[in-house]
């Protein structure tokens, strides 16, 4: 319980880390989706049935990257930054899905939610626990 007592949302570093975390997650997801759409356009190697699982993997990689970046900026509270990052990305994906009339609450949606939250929090934890580079002067 003592780990959660020093969280202040007014801290500029925390807010900056969270904003960069979400923006880097979105950027990574967009880049990976563009790459995957180019691969799917120019080749017919992957069947259409695997598209949902590919999107879950792309979302997982994107939020892992975002959680890592946010935790590296803040240098503490990686789990909290990762969880908030994952929640924001998940809500944004669900809202976009419902606005496009393609969003339904299915087992795939639950799987996507669990994967996004887990990978984002794992990225936050890994971002805090990375050792600094040894610089020889």
Image (spheres, rainbow, N blue to C red):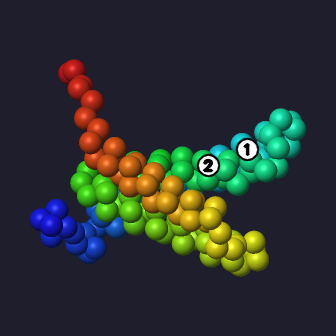
Horizontal and vertical percent position of residue 118: 43, 55
On residue 36, which mark appears?
1
The relative height of residue 7 versus residue 61 in the rendered view (above or below) is below
Residue bearing mark 2: 58
Quarter of the view holding residue 70: bottom left
Left or right: where does residue 40 sit relative to residue 121? right
Q: Work out which residue is located at the far left of the displayed protein and give it.
A: 2
Crowd tier of the residue under label 1, counting other residues whose Cα lies within 10 Å: few below 14, some 14–19, many 20 or above? some
Residue found at x 80% / y 40%? 46
Q: CA distance from mark 2 to mark 1?
A: 9 Å
Left or right: where does residue 82 sit relative to residue 110? left
The relative height of residue 8 versus residue 16 in the rendered view (above or below) is below
Horizontal and vertical percent position of residue 61: 54, 47
Residue found at x 79% / y 50%? 49
Q: For the residue labelled by badge 1, is the local secondary structure a helix, a strand or a loop?
A: helix
Left or right: where does residue 123 sit relative to residue 137? right
Q: Work out which residue is located at the far front of the displayed protein and give it.
A: 107
Is residue 48 shown to the viewer in this render? Answer: yes
Horizontal and vertical percent position of residue 3: 16, 62
Horizontal and vertical percent position of residue 73: 33, 52
Is residue 74 shown to the viewer in this render? Answer: no
Q: Quadrant of the N terminus?
A: bottom left
How many circles with numbers are drawn on the protein? 2
Crowd tier of the residue under label 2, counting other residues whose Cα lies within 10 Å: few below 14, some 14–19, many 20 or above? many
* Earlier residue among tags 2 and 1: 1
Residue found at x 49% / y 60%? 114
Q: Nearer the viewer, residue 107 or 33?
A: 107
Q: Quadrant of the C terminus?
A: top left
């Amino acid at each position: 319980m003592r780990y959660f007592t020093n969280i202040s949302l007014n801290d500029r570093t925390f807010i900056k880390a969270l904003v960069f975390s979400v923006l880097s997650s979105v950027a990574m997801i967009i880049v990976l989706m563009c790459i995957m759409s180019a691969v799917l356009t120019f080749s017919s190697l992957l069947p259409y049935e695997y598209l949902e699982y590919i999107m879950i993997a792309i979302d997982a990689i994107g939020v892992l990257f975002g959680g890592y970046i946010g935790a590296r900026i803040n240098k503490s509270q990686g789990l909290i930054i990762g969880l908030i990052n994952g929640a924001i990305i998940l809500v944004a994906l669900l809202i976009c899905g419902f606005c496009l009339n393609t969003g339904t609450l299915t087992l795939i949606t639950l799987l996507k939610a669990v994967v996004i939250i887990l990978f984002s929090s794992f990225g936050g934890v890994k971002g805090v626990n990375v050792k600094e580079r040894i610089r020889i002067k």
